Amino acid sequence: MDTGLEYGVVIVSSAVKDVMTADVVTVRGDTPFKDMASMLGMSRISALPVVDGAGKVIGLVSEADLLVKEAGQAVPPGWFAGLRRRHDHEKAVGITAAQLMTSPPVVIHPDESAQHAAWLMYDRGVKRLPVVDGAGHLVGIVSRSDVLGVFGRPDEEIRREVTDEVILGSFLMDPALFEVTVASGIVTLAGRPETAAVGRSLIERVRHLDGVVAVRDQLAYPELAYPE
């Protein structure tokens, strides 16, 4: 779990292990192309982690990797010129998982936050991440849809977390001093924090809660006092 310890109370956001799929279909490096194509079709999944004999992840074969081989059958001569297309050509002639997989794979640990998983998928341009333990063994897989699932939290549930666990529990302030509304995951905060620093910390904490799409800051910040 990803936690915040400031102000003495733990605020918990979803970890990868909370949203990942634990039952994963895997293949070995010598698994043939035809078997992988069949697995993807029958299991209604879009990628297969490739593991070695010890269960460690060594790569990932996606539908896109298999599609390169299919497309390679129809490309005109010279199409594979250029570095990237030469790499695609190597995949196009591949017949096993080891030859077709993307390696090394982008992986994540189960205790990392779902937010970090989302950032990693965006930054690396991938659609899913194998989840591995400290020894590199596969324990699950997390996809874009998994991490986006946190935005399905009901608005009232988010509001209760803001008032009960953040304002009261973490910041030790009276929730009655603030007006908290949540609509479609958008949190609007109004009220007067003790200091500007507390107000900014409050907004930042709420921004990172599961299911929060955005935060509208309508706090009345105390004016800074300047000496005469």
Image (cartoon, helix red, strand yellow):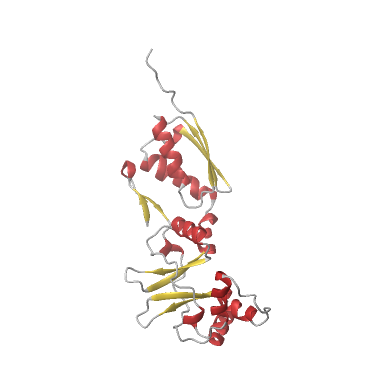
Is residue 45 in view? no
Query: Picture coordinates of residue 87 (x, y %)?
Result: 54, 74
Image quarter of residue 66: bottom right
The residue sitting at 45% across, 32% down in the picture is 177
Q: Position of residue 94 (x, y in %)?
A: 53, 83
Relative image position of residue 217 (x, y in whole percent):
51, 36
Nearest to the observer: residue 17 or residue 167: 17
Residue 18, compared with residue 161, is above or below; it is below
Which quadrant does the N terminus fall into?
Answer: bottom left
Viewer-nearest residue: 153 or 100: 100
Q: Is residue 42 above or below residue 138?
A: below
Question: Which residue is drawn at the image coordinates 51% and 87% (left, top)?
Answer: 32
Classify the position of the C terminus by image quarter.
top left
Viewer-proximal residue among 101 and 196:
101
| Residue depicted at x 39% and y 59% | 112
Residue 14, compared with residue 127, is above or below; it is above
Point out residue 95 in the picture as x, y percentages from the top left corner: 53, 86
Look at the image and tell me whether residue 172 can be seen.
yes
Q: Which image quadrant is residue 168 in?
A: top left
| Front one among 162 and 134 | 134
